[in-house]
Amino acid sequence: MKDFVSMKNLSEHELLQLIKTADEIKEHGIEPFREQLFAANLFFEPSTRTKMSFIVAQRKLGIEVLDFASDFSSVQKGESIYDTARTLESLGASLLVVRHPQDNIVKELSDQISIPVINAGDGKGEHPTQCLLDLLTIYQEYKRFKGIKVAIVGDIKHSRVARSNAYALTTLGAEVYLSSMKEWQDPSLPFPYISMDEAMEQCDVVMLLRIQHERHDSRSVIMDTQYLQDYGLTKERERKMLKHAIIMHPAPVNRGVEIDNDLVECGRSRIFKQMSNGVAARMAVMSKLLGKEGLNHANNFNQRDAVSSR
């Protein structure tokens, strides 16, 4: 695996390896790289959780972070993202982490340069590392995917998180359902739509999505309180959930819009656990791409002495 750009082309075995590696890292940590490595985080969109967790993950791995801010780079002089990437590659970057508002641009970039590229979110395309931390959270809860019913709820049409999770969960054997107001449904995703009330009664995981106002052609006319009542997770709906079911959300959370404020940190919520899992998930991806071997995640997690540097 040279790059980590999409969940579409990963097998069940590859996904499980990454999930189990991330779980092992979360539980026991991992030895940092001994050689000097550099990571360039090219974020062309605002980000808190993704960017900060990548930085924490890189520093835990002993990777030096190259400071890049698009507002203060040659991008402002007209430099293309390809030339920016090639510049950082030429300066010695070991990998690139890219977030960009344009669909599929990360895949195009990964085909053009030789160092590993990680997709940190591309337009309405995919968000594979967010997906990996979501998968890790579900795995920690149920220790399996086959037979698990997951409802992805909200702005499906504009959500890269929805796409990555729907693809990966299906590969792993979970049953994926979508729930959305008609205007935000995506006919390109071959998954059944159910109502919010059906999701409450049937699903083991309710994965909420933020309304992606920045990707809409115009501001949604639906009022926040109306959205919560008609399509969001209210306290009344939460009481109808299966006893063991959990609530997830990739964040940032719009409290009182897609979820009632009191449910964000309720007993069912795994929202902040997802954030915590982001560091281990991204460490697992970067370790794999940069060639750190020895975590025998497919067989025996206890062979810590097998961990070696690249």
Image (spheres, grey):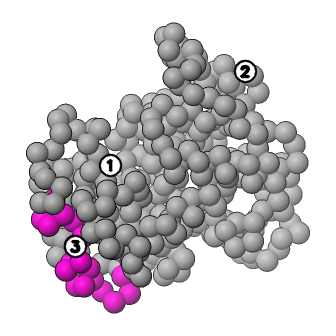
* Amino acid on which disc 3 is placed: Thr
Residue 234's disc number: 3
Which quarter of the figure has residue 96? top right
State the CA–CA distance, disc 1 to disc 2: 34 Å
Vertical relation: 148 (above or below) 116: below
Task: Report the span colored magenta.
Answer: 227-246
Residue identifier under label 1: 159
Mark 3 or mark 2: name the one nearer the start of the chain: 2
| Residue 236 is inside the magenta segment | yes
Residue drawn at x 41%, y 82% as measured from the top left: 267
Residue ID for mark 2: 90
Mark 3 to mark 1 CA distance (whole Å): 21 Å
| Local secondary structure at mark 1 | loop
Residue 76 in picture, x, y percent from top left: 50, 15
Q: Nearer the viewer, residue 255 or 290?
A: 255
Q: Residue at x 17, y 35 (%)?
A: 218
Residue 174 screen position, x and y as percent: 39, 72
- Find residue 254 and report its horizontal and vertical position in percent: 31, 56
Observer able to see residue 190 = yes
**Identity of the residue drawn at 78% across and 62% down:** 30
Residue type at the position of mark 2: Ser
Three-letter residue code for mark 1? Ser
Q: Secondary structure at mark 3?
A: loop
